[in-house]
Image (tube, helix red, strand yellow):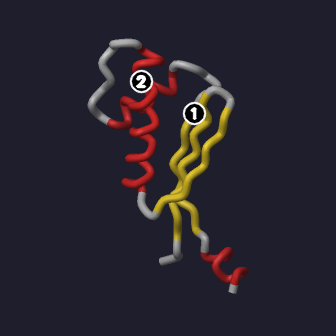
Amino acid sequence: MHPGVVVLVIIYEGACKVTLHATQAQAWRQLMEFVDRRWEARFGRTPSPIEPEARADQFFRNDADDLYAIIDADVSELRNALG
């Protein structure tokens, strides 16, 4: 198994945020915190879906320029390059 990292990319209102996580679960938690903090500003009092994927999909579907990606990345070559 290669050493890896999970990359969370959020593009929202023209700003790009990239964070690295040890697990998919950690990346999803951060994404849900991001969405939950901004939900009311975007949707008012409309309740958010309980399921995390549905909540993220609905949040980012609202604006075609906004998106998120959770990507598993192999960092073995980087590790070797750094010695």
Q: Nearer the viewer, residue 73 or 18?
A: 18
Amino acid of disc 1: Leu
Q: Residue at x 61, y 71 (%)?
A: 75
Question: Along the line of sight, which residue is nearer the eye, 8 or 41?
Answer: 41
Residue ranking furthest to the left: 50
Check disc 2 and report the residue beneath it. Answer: 39
| Quarter of the image where one finds residue 20 | bottom right
In the rendered image, which residue does mark 1 sit on? Answer: 67
Q: Residue at x 47, y 77 (%)?
A: 1
**Residue 41 spot, x, y in % from top left:** 46, 18
The reply, left or right, for residue 5 in relation to residue 49 is: right
Q: Quadrant of residue 49?
A: top left
Q: Residue furthest right?
A: 81
Measure the alpha-carbon separation of dots 2 and 1.
Answer: 15 Å
In front of the other: 40 or 66: 40
Q: Say whether residue 28 is left or right of residue 60.
A: left
**With respect to residue 29, does 79 lie above or below?**
below
Taking the view exactly as shown, the residue that stands out farthest to the bottom is 83
In which quadrant is the C terminus drawn? bottom right
Q: Is label 1 in a helix, a strand or a loop? A: strand
Q: Earlier in the sequence, mark 2 or mark 1?
A: 2
Q: What's the residue at 42%, 15% (across, down)?
A: 43
Relative height, residue 1 to residue 54 (above, below): below
| Percent of width and height locating residue 15 | 66, 34
- Badge 2: few (under 14), some or many (20 or more) residues near its Cα, within 10 Å? some
Kind of residue sitting beneath label 2: Trp
51 to the left or right of 29:
left
Question: Percent position (x, y) of residue 77?
Answer: 67, 76
